[in-house]
Image (cartoon, rainbow, N blue to C red):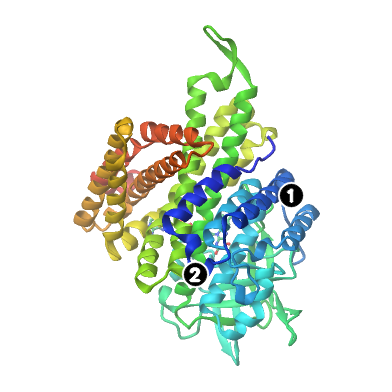
Amino acid sequence: MTDFVPPLEAIRSQMNHVAKTHGIFELEGFAEINDDLTEAILDEAGKFAQKVLAPINVLGDREGAVCKDGDVTVPAEFIDAYRQFVDNGWPSLGGNPEFGGQGVPELVVNAVYEMFTAANLAFTLCPKLTQGGIYSILYHGTDELKQRYLEPLIEGRYTASMDLTEPSAGSDLGRVTTMAVPEGDHYRITGRKIYITWGDHNMAENVIHLVLARTPDAAPGSRGLSMFLVPKYLLNEDGSPGERNDMLPLSIEHKMGIHCSPTCVMSYGEEDGAIGYLVGTEGAGLASMFTMMNQMRLGVGLQGVGVAERAYQDSVYYARDRIQGSIPGKGDVAIIEHGDVRRMLLTMRAMTVASRAVVLETAAALDQQAHGDDDEKRSHYRIYADLLTPIAKGWCTEIAQEAASLSVQVYGGMGYVEESGVAQHMRDARILPIYEGTNGIQALDLVGRKLLKQGDACMRAVISDVRKLAADLPADLSTEAKRLQAGADSLETTTDWLVEHHQDDPNTVSSVAYNYMMQSGTVIGGWLTLRHALAATEAGEKHARANLMTAKFYLEQLMPRAQSYAAGVTSGGASIIDFPEAMF
Ligand SMILES: Cc1cc2nc3c(=O)[nH]c(=O)nc-3n(C[C@H](O)[C@H](O)[C@H](O)COP(=O)(O)OP(=O)(O)OC[C@H]3O[C@@H](n4cnc5c(N)ncnc54)[C@H](O)[C@@H]3O)c2cc1C
């Protein structure tokens, strides 16, 4: 594997373009943010990713975490990296200034975390989950919970985990059985959760679990769920961690990738029941948890971008170095000279740029949703962020699979050998379409909730923006204009179809939603890639030509996929629905 080189110029250029498009740095809440500051933040983050996180990525994969006698430990190198992470102030980057945070926009935080993720996905999951936990407590917690827990979480002294899944409650959280019985000012939690990422470890002073559980008289299904803050160590009066709560990790999973991210089976209440505190109101647990889940869904999309970038970098390096085959007039050549290898590299490159654009656009929408000037603007951007989030999670993580797999292909036989390092990218990336709501569930969210329930106006506005960019392109980009227009047309066709036919059969939406999600990502990713390339050209940026050529490649080679996804939608999925179960 090659050394990780932070893609600073690419990230900075794309981030600044999105910031300018949506006026992020002009927002009142971000008065102290300026170009010099964001540049310094990105530079430092790049150095940290390159010098501290990337060098321990393979070690983490080989050594992994260990669970013994009710405690999880990670290698000393991870503990040291986390200490440096905290000392350098990274956990507080996006945190609320009222509780010691630096109040940096989500847009910048996401740009920073792309580099951390690309350098070391397993490590970065820990602070990323903590960010989600912070938001849940901030938006739904009582003043007392905020006072006691937010500062140490924002400072990185504590970390957070998200405890939803149980053996019989995966995608269907309405089946959660963990119980929470009221007792004075707290609840007693009993039950078992599985697959809890960074559910226990020895990098921080305390682990704060945000647990979905059911109160005794709660309604059945998801309406009966509440969210509880369950600390590993209960806090003393003075706020310091004290007695251990009645909970422990029973084991960790031996899994395909992200070996140094402990995936814990957690048990609550082996004795009297773990002490937990209600976050939000009883019965509104899923809504409270969604604050964390939406953060994490975007975060997982971002992980897709990070993995794709890393896989691309390694592939370019190898393709330049590996001599194989010859080309008339050139003699023996490095494989980067072969058309098929160039196709793979450009596919990875264009997909990485497009998926980064989708994630940054979503992050900017979240910033406007939280800090926009007036109610109308905040509401507009909330709907936009809602629409983009399942696309960012679903499409960007599918992109990561393709990029990681192409990377193995570029390496040939060496790609299949662990020593090359690209096999780790592929193993690590495979979880991305599964956790935080599988991509099937993201597709259902996009079509069922965001398009059909919230209304199709936002998607129609996006389609209109895509069309406008196509119409405004100069004459020398008329071919690109037609290709972009074709993408917009196909997305409009499927949107119309879904609005009209979604009730044709109870399984219609489920059968076609994935194709709609992939089509939306393909069209929106291409639009944003071109929008950025044009802005970079106009500003005379150093890499403007490469940006424009990447966008042209995307429109020529990847945008046509929108048509085939569209065919999958407008077919109505008849062949899927009609296939008798007994014939499988
Ligand atoms: C490494 C790892 C880390 C994880 N970290 C966490 C964590 O920190 N916290 C946490 O709470 N959980 C965590 N999870 C759990 C993860 O979120 C779940 O695995 C995921 O939500 C899917 O649930 P499931 O595994 O039960 O699959 P199932 O729900 O059984 O799904 C199996 C398949 O059926 C499909 N499916 C299910 N229901 C429907 C439906 N209604 N319509 C269409 N298709 C459907 C799914 O898309 C999937 O393809 C983690 C899992 C792993 C492997």
Residue 52 is labelled as 1
Residue 306's spot in the image, x, y percent? 57, 46
Which of these two is toward me, 485 or 69? 485
The amino acid at mark 2 is: Glu
- 156 lies above or below 338: below
Q: Residue 430: tell me if it is visible.
A: no
Q: Report the Cα–Cα distance between label 1 and label 2.
A: 34 Å
Q: Where does the image place residue 501, in percent across and percent down from the top left?
A: 20, 54
Q: Secondary structure at mark 1?
A: helix
Left or right relative to 540: residue 186: right
Q: Earlier in the sequence, mark 1 or mark 2?
A: 2
Query: Which of the two residues, 335 or 427, is positioned nearer the viewer here?
Result: 335
Instruction: Kindly identify the residue that appears in the image at 46 percent across and 86 percent down.
Output: 217
* Residue located at (52% from left, 38% from top): 403
The quarter of the rendered structure image containing the N terminus is top right
Name the residue at the top extreme: 329
- Image quarter where the C terminus lies is top left
Residue hosting label 2: 28
Residue at 55% over, 56% down = 110
Percent position of residue 285, x then y: 48, 76
Residue 191 to residue 239: above or below: above
Assign a secondary structure to mark 2: helix
Using the rendered image of the protein, determine whether residue 249 is visible from the camera's viewpoint: yes
**Crowdedness near tag 1: few (<14), some (14–19) or many (≥20) residues, C-alpha within 10 Å:** many
Q: Which mark is residue 402?
A: none
Q: Amino acid at mark 1?
A: Val
User: In this rendering, would 306 be left or right of 560?
Assistant: right
Label 1 beta carbon within 8 A of ligand 1: no
106, 473: nearer the viewer: 473
Q: Residues within 10 Å of mark 2 (few under 14, many from 20)?
A: few
Compared across the picture, whether 252 is left or right of 368 comes to right
